[in-house]
Image (tube, helix red, strand yellow):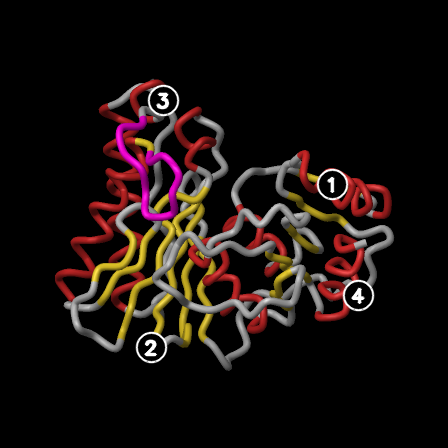
């Protein structure tokens, strides 16, 4: 069993009610799952998610709590395992219930809930909560966030987080690693994006492996511009809110637009 306690999320008071309730539900379900199941049980897979990857028990348990929130408010839900739940609303909660599930199931304290309120296809507000610490980042589109990026504009000497290297994109991965001052692999895209947003690191990227789904990027799409940063796809594809979770991107999250573009160019080679 994983013995560490799970604190309540520290949600800012101005947060949209649905986002706040979803984060609380995710944290409560995460806490309950950790108390009831051991590492092996948390990681057990018995079904395929809407994104075409296996769903861990932990994913399903946490998502169930979030789905209840969306249902209670009669809004749509787009989530990693269940896919799109249409409640006939113009408002959709787009959520990654547990980003970094493999970390969480193993007891590595690097996982997060991330969600955004999307109205008619446009993300307007986002909340990301670090499940093991309760730390939260809240942002509203068009408003300056309370946190700021590092402001770094150049890749040389930057601190960069990357998804693990894949055989199909190993050259791109190493091109970035050779220029950065520091490279981290934390295996939790939503949390890594917020570390860029608050200035703890300079950039985060998928080095052209096309791993990211929109649920991995939607919170960053709100938070990074609000904090002075940028989010884009390595190949310049638009980041679109779509119910098709088989669509993939290679996301770049950076302290500035200049750094994001240089990082994408370096990855493309």
Figure quadrant of residue 95: bottom left
Q: Quadrant of the C terminus?
A: bottom right
- Residue at 37%, 59% (x, y): give it: 244
Q: Is residue 141 left or right of residue 94?
A: right
- Earlier in the chain: of badge 4 and badge 2, it is 2
Tell me how far mark 2 sits from mark 3, CA to CA.
40 Å
Identity of the residue drawn at 72% across and 48% down: 160
Which numbered disc, 2 or 1, marks the residue closer to the eye?
A: 2
Looking at the rendering, the stretch of residues picked out in magenta corresponds to 45-55
Label 4 and label 2: CA atoms lie apart by: 32 Å
In this rendering, the answer to whether 11 lies above or below 59 is below
Q: Which residue is mark 4?
A: 153
Judging from the image, what secondary structure is the residue with disc 4 in? loop
Cα distance between the residues tagged 1 and 4: 17 Å
Residue 128 in the image: state x and y as whole percent.
43, 56
Specify few, some or many for label 3: CA neighbours under 10 Å numbering under 14, 14-19, or 20 or more.
few
- Mark 3 or mark 4, whichever is nearer to me: 4
The quarter of the picture where the N terminus appears is top left
Q: At x 40% / y 71%, what residue is drawn?
A: 125
Q: Which residue is mark 3?
A: 3
Distance, label 2 to label 1, CA atoms, is 36 Å
How crowded pointer 4 is (Cα within 10 Å; few <14, some 14-19, many 20+) is rated as some
Confirm whether the magenta stretch covers residue 53. Answer: yes
In the figure, 218 relative to 178: above or below? below
Q: Which residue is mark 1?
A: 183
> Mark 3 or mark 1, which is nearer the start of the sequence?
3
Taking depth in this image into account, of 86 and 92 the one nearest to the observer is 86
Q: Are marks 3 and 4 in contact (CB under 8 Å)?
A: no
Residue 72 to residue 5: above or below: below
Q: Earlier in the sequence, mark 2 or mark 3?
A: 3
């Amino acid at each position: 069993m994983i013995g560490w306690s799970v604190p309540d999320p520290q949600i800012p008071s101005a947060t949209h009610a649905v986002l706040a309730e979803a984060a609380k539900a995710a944290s409560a379900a995460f806490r309950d799952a950790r108390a009831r199941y051991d590492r092996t049980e948390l990681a057990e897979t018995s079904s395929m998610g809407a994104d075409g990857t296996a769903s861990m028990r932990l994913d399903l348990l946490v998502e169930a709590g979030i789905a209840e929130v969306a249902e209670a408010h009669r809004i749509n839900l787009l989530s990693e395992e269940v896919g799109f739940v249409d409640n006939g609303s113009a408002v959709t909660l787009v959520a990654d219930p547990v980003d970094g599930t493999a970390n969480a199931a193993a007891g590595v304290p690097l996982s997060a809930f991330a969600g955004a309120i999307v109205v008619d296809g446009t993300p307007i507000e986002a909340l990301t909560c670090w499940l093991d610490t309760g730390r939260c980042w809240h942002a509203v589109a068009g408003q300056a966030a309370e946190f700021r990026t590092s402001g770094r504009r150049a890749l040389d000497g930057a601190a960069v987080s990357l998804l693990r290297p894949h055989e199909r994109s190993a050259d791109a991965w190493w091109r970035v690693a050779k220029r950065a001052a520091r490279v981290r692999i934390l295996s939790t895209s939503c949390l890594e994006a917020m570390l860029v947003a608050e200035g703890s690191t300079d950039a985060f990227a998928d080095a052209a492996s096309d791993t990211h789904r929109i649920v991995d990027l939607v919170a960053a799409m709100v938070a990074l511009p609000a904090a002075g940063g940028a989010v884009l796809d390595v190949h310049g594809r638009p980041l679109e809110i779509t119910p098709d979770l088989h669509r993939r991107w290679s996301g770049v999250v950076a302290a500035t637009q200049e750094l994001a573009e240089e990082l994408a160019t370096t990855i493309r080679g």
